[in-house]
Amino acid sequence: MLKVNVYVTLKKEILDAQGLVIRKAIKQIGYENVNEVRFGKFIQLEIDDKNKSEEEIKKEIDYLSDKLLSNPNIENYRFEMVGK
Amino acid sequence: MLKVNVYVTLKKEILDAQGLVIRKAIKQIGYENVNEVRFGKFIQLEIDDKNKSEEEIKKEIDYLSDKLLSNPNIENYRFEMVGK
Amino acid sequence: MSFDKKPYFGILVFPGTNCETDCFHVLKNILGARCKYVWHKESQVEDINAIVIPGGFSYGDYLRSGAVAKFSPIMSFVRKFASKGGLVIGICNGFQILLEESLLPGAMLRNNTLKFICRYSHLKVTDTDNPFTSGYKSGEIIRMPIRHNEGNYYIDDNGLLEIKENNQVILKYCDSSGKEDASSNPNGSIENIAGICNKKRNIFGLMPHPEACCEKILGSDDGKTIFESMVNNII
Amino acid sequence: MLDVEKEYIKLGLKENEFEKIKGFLKRNPNYLELSIYSVMWSEHCSYKSSRPLLKNFKTTGTYVLQGPGENAGILDIGDNQAIVFKMESHNHPSAVEPYQGAATGIGGIIRDIFAMGARPICSLNSLRFGKIESSQHQKYLFEMVVKGIGDYGNCMGIPTIGGEVYFDKTYEGNCLVNAMSVGIAQQDRLMKSKAFGTGNQLVLMGSSTGRDGIHGATFASDELNEKSEARRPSVQVGDPFMEKVLLEVCLELIEKKLILGLQDMGAAGITSSSVEMASKGNVGLDIDVAKVPLREPSMVPYEIMISESQERMLALIEPSKFAEIKNICNEWNINCEAIGTVTDNGLYRIFKGRELLGEIPVKTLTDEAPVYHHEYEKPKYLQNISDDILQEEDYKKIEKKYSHNEIFKRMIASPNICSKKWVWEQYDHMVQTNTAVLPGHDSSVIRIKNTKKAIAFSCDGNGRYCYLDPFRGALIAVAETSRNLACSGALPIGLTDCLNFGMPEKPGIFWQFKNAIDGIINACETLDIPVISGNVSFYNESFGKAIHPTPVIATAGLIKDVDKIIDSAFKDENDDIVLIGRKINNESVNDNMGGSEFLEVFFEKVSGKCPDIDIEYEKRLQRLCLDLIDGRFIKSAHDVSSGGLAVTIAESCIYGKMGAEINASLLGNNFLKTFYSEPQSQILISCQPENLEKIEKYCIEAKIPFEKIGKVKGTFISINSEIKIGISEITKIFDNNIEKIMTH
Ligand SMILES: Nc1ncnc2c1ncn2[C@@H]1O[C@H](COP(=O)(O)OP(=O)(O)O)[C@@H](O)[C@H]1O
Ligand SMILES: [Mg+2]
């Protein structure tokens, strides 16, 4: 069993409305020192790697991240294998 | 400037409807080997650490994560300092 | 009932609240009660007998519904008001805020359909021994609109036992014949729960919108009884 | 220094346009100026191809306070109240990024409404996709567009009360997303967007400005192709929470009389909104880009000027009011900066602090923008469409293959016919507690609190009819919305349109456009409905192929007494069912099967003759329907439209949860033709038997044919003993088919 974490974030130039609201809330709570907040998604996958090489799996994840997990119009993604 | 990543995930015992839908979509695409998908949030903070120790900041993040960024009734969180 | 004895409702307004005028209309024009809007930055409200936290999308519901609103100054007043036994009703987003604020037990998850739902739903009034539903018959089946993204009520096993033991479950989703099952559950809510109160029975949260069904021209006036019950229990 | 000579093409300007610019400026423009010209002269902003034709619309009338020209049109509904509405397309952004494209489309049209000083009270939408049964991508577009519209409107607390959705191959590469918003205002609080008063300031409120949507207006004026994928920076994202706050702030500023004018920011951002304000007031304007709050500090002036960041508004104010306005914005946590000053020199000047970056005579951007009188010619495809499409043996073949019950079920199951519940249940259609007739009926109705009045809305367009005959198709679209209103008891008082077409440079397309406009004009004149606002969307093509011409019409109707509203549901057992309007001899003119849903479902073709319509006759029919409702003689009314009479009967049964026994006379003995053809000008009504005679008298007086065709009865729909199906069975198909397709 392989665990993979995929992180999806909005592209830099895209308005992050959620991040802005969170930042304002943090200031309201009284933490003045938080300057920027970016909101993203975090998807954990558990993958059966019995019959596949790590390379193959990486390719699959890359494909899935691009086509399904993120929206390339507005988001970037990155992923990491976090072990078995 | 300190960067902190906070990860918020639904507790194990809670049905993750979004995760299930993603898993179904992945199977539909033809990747049979993805067994579990959990959907979470990923919040990146940029913190001004000029006048504060790392310990203090950790405490702050812990407080924020517990009170604002996650709802302890349904979610777990963890965070990591990813450097300056 | 003399004029200045008319019950006085405070209707909270957060940025993003959008049902405050609907509540105002019902309370003032249909029930003849007095009411005023209370901006979230206020920390003290005089003279009111009850608080309404209306529906909407406070702060866009961007992080979690109700999560940001709870840090507003007004919420510590709500806490104080409630601890002295004042009546507080949270409708939809108001219910979500009460949960986030831990004034009511449990939490709200996304609808298991992952879609916003706007439609009439049948509800069973499972408890009438409280100031909010005392005007209904116990077990009565009523119709109210539901309109939400996150109405999938969740509470852990112990919590569930507790709220059941204390008769805190007040409204449940059902079908027209009163059956509560998966097919009459619109959002995945645990045991079809649509509304609960606190142990002291003076705080009530519900996902359906009673303020949207107080006039026959809108298709139902089943919701009026909730506000009438509150008025009657204030006097 | 850039070589502007090469840049103008990239910016979408033509050579003659570039020459014209040089003539106006008497020099070469710099890149900033060129960018400003390019967005202001884009089809999207300048209407350069359509302006000459749109001028011919009927735009005045008893109820009109403001026709086309402002951000939205305004109608007088009495009691010092006005309704304000407009429809707009967001087709191209939605094709590339359906969720955000649709969301920002809604956001944009809502800003148009509150820019007029009105509080939005409802929205409608008209959608077109390819066939969802056969394509995952079409499903995805449909799903995300609906979600985008829902999420935005729901968060704003504005009910989305109606609209229409059609699926047809023609929209496969180019979906249509047309959104309409309606507001209500006190007549003495209406706002204009004109800039005036030298020294007055322009204040920018709302979101900060980022790089999104740079060259979006140019993008909308271009056809879709592979390159569209790569043009993603044009995608804008919406923030409905910000817009809700902005709405409340603007209405508060108006209420407190702190602002003199208001203008939303849409396509081409600061540039187009400020230029339009200046042009309307015949004044000049100095803009300081250094004052604009930025999301990305590295943005350069031209990006700032044309960025299409959403959720921003521009207000005209007296400088002395600025502090108070700023306070209100602070209370709500939004930006507020004075970015411009009104001048008297007629020039549009852009500064960065003190540095002058560009200078353009205002009128050269607006009134003197190019106008094109395109050539037109009847398209060739029309020569190959035969009038007689179905022969007796074709009908026989269908009847041999399927039982009448099966044919009926197939028709009801067609995504174009079955309930759009899957859509509207994702829209909050009840917030504001005014929706007196919920979606699902001929028109949706909003009551006006504290009065006896209500306003009804209906939205319609039929691309297939317009493909066969754009004149008649557009005429029918107007007639149908108006008929839908009549069915709920509303008198039509004004309409808005969204005209979706291919490339106007192609003579065949421009012919379609011209004819559709003539059709609208013709219908509006006869039915006495003014056009008070609208929108044109050209370049709806993919890979060189245009969509069916699709003019979409949305009409508003006034109801004087909310207690008289009726809907299309059968009400009581034993009520009589009556068809009014059918001319038995209709068939000789035209078999009314052209462009029908029946033809599409069973033969998968768009052909034949567009149904005939006599608009004078139509007017009498609608008048009659209104009179019958006003006299409280009828309990339901439902017009016959796509799918024909059988579908109309089924819908009235399904909505009323009641059966019907129908026995109608057949046209030329042909059951299928009688029940599935789509002749215009027919309304199915139901009434108490006691009222039948009175109704007949009214019909005779109005010279409208009348035929009692059955009774409300039992739990089955039975039609001429050929169809017999339980209400619950047909309701399941009707209610759940889209959901079923979408979850497959
Ligand atoms: N996109 C949509 N959004 C909201 N309501 C819709 C939408 N599409 C269709 N509806 C509703 O479904 C009903 C039927 O639509 P339609 O078949 O186009 O009506 P008609 O044939 O009377 O013009 C109407 O009440 C309409 O408002
Ligand atoms: Mg109709």
Image: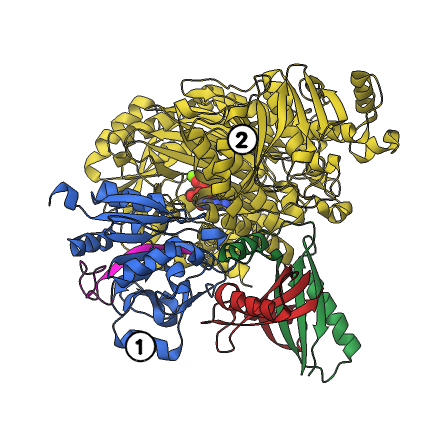
Chain colours: A green, B red, C blue, D yellow
Comparing D242 with D141, the one in front is D242
* Picture quadrant of ligand 2: top left
x then y, percent, for residue D528: 44, 20
For the point 37% across and 40% down, the residue is D665
Name the kind of residue labelled 2 in the image: Asp
Circle 2 sits on which residue? Answer: D497
Query: Is label 2 in a helix, a strand or a loop?
Result: strand
Query: Would you say the residues marked 1 and 2 are in contact, meaning their CB atoms lie under 8 Å apart?
Result: no
Comparing C227 with D508, the one in front is C227
Q: Is residue D561 magenta?
A: no
Mark 2 lies within 8 Å of ligand 1 (Cβ measured): no
Could you tell me if residue C88 is visible in this image? yes
x then y, percent, for residue D486: 37, 31
Q: Is residue D449 left or right of residue C129?
A: right
Host chain of mark 1: C
Circle 1 sits on which residue? Answer: C162
The quadrant in which the C terminus of chain D is found is: bottom right
For the point 25% across and 72% down, the residue is C167
Could you tell me if residue D553 is visible in this image? no
Whether labels 1 and 2 share one chain: no
x then y, percent, for residue D644: 45, 42
Comparing D157 with D250, the one in front is D250
Name the kind of residue labelled 1 in the image: Glu
Vertical order, C184 against D64 (above or below): below
Which residues, given as a range, are shown in magenta? C126-148
For the point 66% across and 42% down, the residue is D294
